[in-house]
Image (cartoon, grey):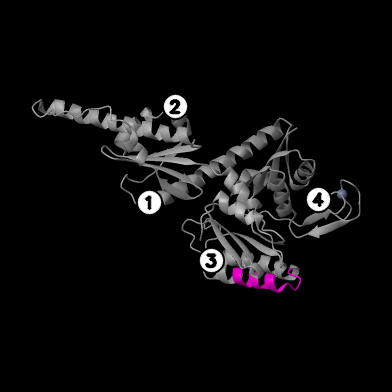
């Protein structure tokens, strides 16, 4: 499975199914919620049933759906994958599978172009992590983003050495010990400095270190204030750990940072609600705010789905039909999942969408809420 890049998304977005429509499938395979493979396969079955009805006899789409089904049933390595996006158009030989380190909203879309909205929002919102591993002698520096870990340790070597290691052979054990401590400090300072250089070249949203307890505090104390502000926890891996181990530790830390971010967003929502302004909660109110283009940030509980209605006249979404609550037209289409539609509308509007995993506070508020522009 390919990792996602902005170029790849641009290429996908430019694709047009001239001969036959494109089938897009987003599947949430998050092992935290779907423990067994059958659990997410069942979700795929439900979507497949609806999609087959909508395929409208297109042989190409039928083939796409079969291939997607076979691919998922062939097993997905979920060690670092929480969501999968599949783009298929048999008539044009298009078959692209993208694995994502975050969960996605389940969806199958059949359209003339690939539905890249979720991928786009993922790439736009994605945070860059700086990772510094050190012990008394060694240091390694990494950038972690889009689920990929890149070794940037060369930055450590590029720094000028400002300490000249002289011999202290004859000066006694105390002096020797002092000398070793001094060398360690110089080494840690250099590592902290290299990390900051990397941050200046392309800023991190979050920063983490992995170091033995004895030196972790000292290393943190040498960090530039910008990096201290971005510290998001420590990585429990040694400086000599394998790339794979470091990557998995970073993925776990990232999931934790995501959950904290979700909790903070729900707190902002509750505070704003308490203040009686610039926020709404509950599906109907959220749908109305979206229609009015007032939403800055949309929060939705992961897995929340709800049947609803779409107005052909004014485009409004609603929980109750068939008379449109906005324009009063009696011309609404029934939707199996109006929440999904709302997420898509928000993405098209360029609104930030946060899918909150296991956030009980948001569930209490009606499983969806929105922070508003005015
Ligand atoms: Zn309407």
User: Residue farthest to the right?
Assistant: 329
The disc, 1 or 4, on the residue closer to the chain's N-terminal end is: 1
Q: Residue at x 34, y 35 (%)?
A: 158
| Nearest to N terminus: mark 3 or mark 4 | 3
> Which residue sits at x=36%, y=28%?
222
Q: Is 368 situated left or right of 94 in this image?
A: right
**Is residue 103 in sight in this rendering?**
no
Residue that mark 3 sits on: 37
Dot 1 beta carbon under 8 Å from ligand 1: no
- In 3D space, how far apart are the residues under numbered discs 3 and 4 (Cα atoms)? 34 Å
Q: Residues within 10 Å of mark 2 (few under 14, many from 20)?
A: few
Q: Which residue, given by chain and number where applicable, does mark 4 sit on?
A: 318
Label 1 close to label 4 by CB (< 8 Å)? no
Q: Does the magenta run of residues contain 62? A: yes
Q: Which residue is mark 2?
A: 225
Q: CA distance from mark 1 to mark 4?
A: 48 Å
- Residue identifier under label 1: 243
User: For mark 3, does the 10 Å Cα neighbourhood hold few (<14), some (14 to 19), or many (20 or more) residues?
Assistant: some
Image quadrant in which the C terminus is located: top right
SS at mark 4 in the image: strand
Q: Would you say the residues marked 3 and 1 are in contact, meaning their CB atoms lie under 8 Å apart?
A: no
**What residue range appears in magenta?**
55-68
């Amino acid at each position: 499975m390919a990792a996602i890049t902005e170029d790849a998304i641009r290429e996908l977005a430019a694709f047009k199914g001239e001969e036959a429509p494109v089938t897009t499938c987003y599947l949430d395979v998050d092992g935290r919620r779907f423990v067994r493979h059958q659990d997410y396969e069942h979700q795929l079955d439900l979507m497949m049933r609806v999609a087959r009805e909508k395929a409208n006899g297109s042989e190409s789409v039928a083939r796409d759906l079969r291939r997607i089904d076979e691919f998922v049933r062939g097993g997905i390595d979920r060690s670092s994958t929480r969501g999968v996006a599949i783009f298929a158009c048999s008539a044009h030989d298009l078959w692209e599978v993208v694995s994502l380190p975050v969960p996605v909203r389940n969806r199958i879309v059949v359209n003339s172009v690939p539905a890249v909205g979720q991928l786009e929002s993922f790439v736009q919102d994605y945070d860059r992590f700086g990772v510094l591993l050190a012990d008394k002698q060694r240091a390694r520096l990494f950038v972690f983003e889009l689920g990929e870990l890149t070794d940037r340790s060369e930055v450590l070597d590029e720094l000028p050495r400002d300490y000249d290691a002289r011999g202290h052979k004859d000066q006694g054990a105390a002096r020797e010990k002092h000398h070793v401590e001094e060398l360690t400090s110089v080494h840690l300072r250099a590592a902290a400095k290299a990390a900051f250089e990397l941050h200046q070249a392309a800023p991190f949203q979050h920063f983490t270190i992995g170091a033995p307890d004895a030196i972790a505090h000292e290393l943190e104390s040498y960090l530039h204030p910008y990096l201290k502000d971005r510290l998001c926890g420590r990585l429990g891996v040694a400086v000599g750990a394998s790339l794979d181990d470091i990557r998995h530790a970073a993925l776990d830390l990232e999931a934790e940072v995501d959950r904290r971010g979700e909790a903070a967003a729900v707190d902002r929502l509750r505070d704003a609600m308490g203040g009686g302004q610039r926020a709404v909660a509950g599906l109907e109110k959220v749908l109305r705010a979206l229609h009015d283009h007032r939403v800055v940030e949309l929060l939705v509980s992961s897995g929340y789905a709800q049947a609803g209605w779409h107005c052909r006249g004014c485009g409004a979404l609603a929980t109750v039909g068939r008379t449109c609550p906005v324009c009063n037209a009696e011309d609404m289409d029934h939707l199996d999942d109006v929440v999904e539609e709302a997420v898509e509308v928000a993405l098209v509007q360029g609104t930030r969408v946060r899918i909150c995993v296991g956030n009980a506070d948001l569930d209490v508020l009606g499983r969806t809420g929105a922070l508003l522009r005015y």
